[in-house]
Image (tube, rainbow, N blue to C red):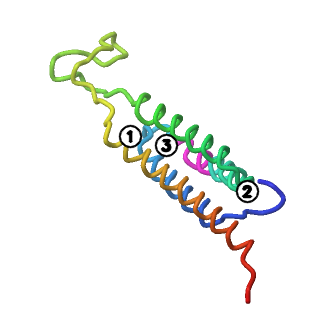
């Protein structure tokens, strides 16, 4: 974190809570082992990004976080221990094309994208209000 301190503590806290909820979609073993480190790294990065305050940096941060989360939460699922109903084994046993494996929920991904865009829009609104208020002179 930069030496100036956190300029947007409410935004960072809200983003950290949202990311903490997003971590619940990760595989359980990954969550148990790395949850604290992931939250701390996210918090430090979010503080640095929001302190710089450029829209392009916030957009890159949100998109990078979303891409990493989608890859980890949706594509790296833990393999089930049991065999499928159709008699096909898990991907580890060579049946990588199981037709009854879980699929990525498009509505879940779109809802997540909406939440992240909402956070980005809220941040831009706060920046716009700060600019307007900095030019406002009390009467």
Mark 1 or mark 3, whichever is nearer to me: 1
Circle nearer the N terminus (1, 3): 3
Q: Mark 3 and mark 2: span between their CA atoms?
A: 28 Å
Q: Circle 3 — which element?
A: helix
Left or right: residue 108 versus residue 46 is: left
**Residue labelled with disc 3:** 31
Residue 62: x and y in percent read 57, 44
Q: Inspect the magenta stretch and tell me whether residue 108 lies in it.
A: no
Left or right: residue 139 versus residue 110 is: right
Residue at 50% across / 44% down in the picture? 32
Quick check: marks 1 and 2 in contact, CB under 8 Å? no
**Residue labelled with disc 2:** 51
**Residue labelled with disc 1:** 109
Task: Indicate which disc residue 139 carries.
Answer: none
Residue 56: x and y in percent read 66, 44
Q: Nearer the viewer, residue 76 or 110?
A: 110
Q: Mark 1 and mark 3: span between their CA atoms?
A: 19 Å
Which residue range is magenta in the image?
32-39
Circle nearer the N terminus (1, 2): 2
Q: Is residue 98 above or below residue 107?
A: above
Residue farthest toward the right in the current orientation of the protein: 3
Q: Nearer the viewer, residue 97 or 138?
A: 138
Residue at 33% across / 10% down in the picture? 94
């Amino acid at each position: 974190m930069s030496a100036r301190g956190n300029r947007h503590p409410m935004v960072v806290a809200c983003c950290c809570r949202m990311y903490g909820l997003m971590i619940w979609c990760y595989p359980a073993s990954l969550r148990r082992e790395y949850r604290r480190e992931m939250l701390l790294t996210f918090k430090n990065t979010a503080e640095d990004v929001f302190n710089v305050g450029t829209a392009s940096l916030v957009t890159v941060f949100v998109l990078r976080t979303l891409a990493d989360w989608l890859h980890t939460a949706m594509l790296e699922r833990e393999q089930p221990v049991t065999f499928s109903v159709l008699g096909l084994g898990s991907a580890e046993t060579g049946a990588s094309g199981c037709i009854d494996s879980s699929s990525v929920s498009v509505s879940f991904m779109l809802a997540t994208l909406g939440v992240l865009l909402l956070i980005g829009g809220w941040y831009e609104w706060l920046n716009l209000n700060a600019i307007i208020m900095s030019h406002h002179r009390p009467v």
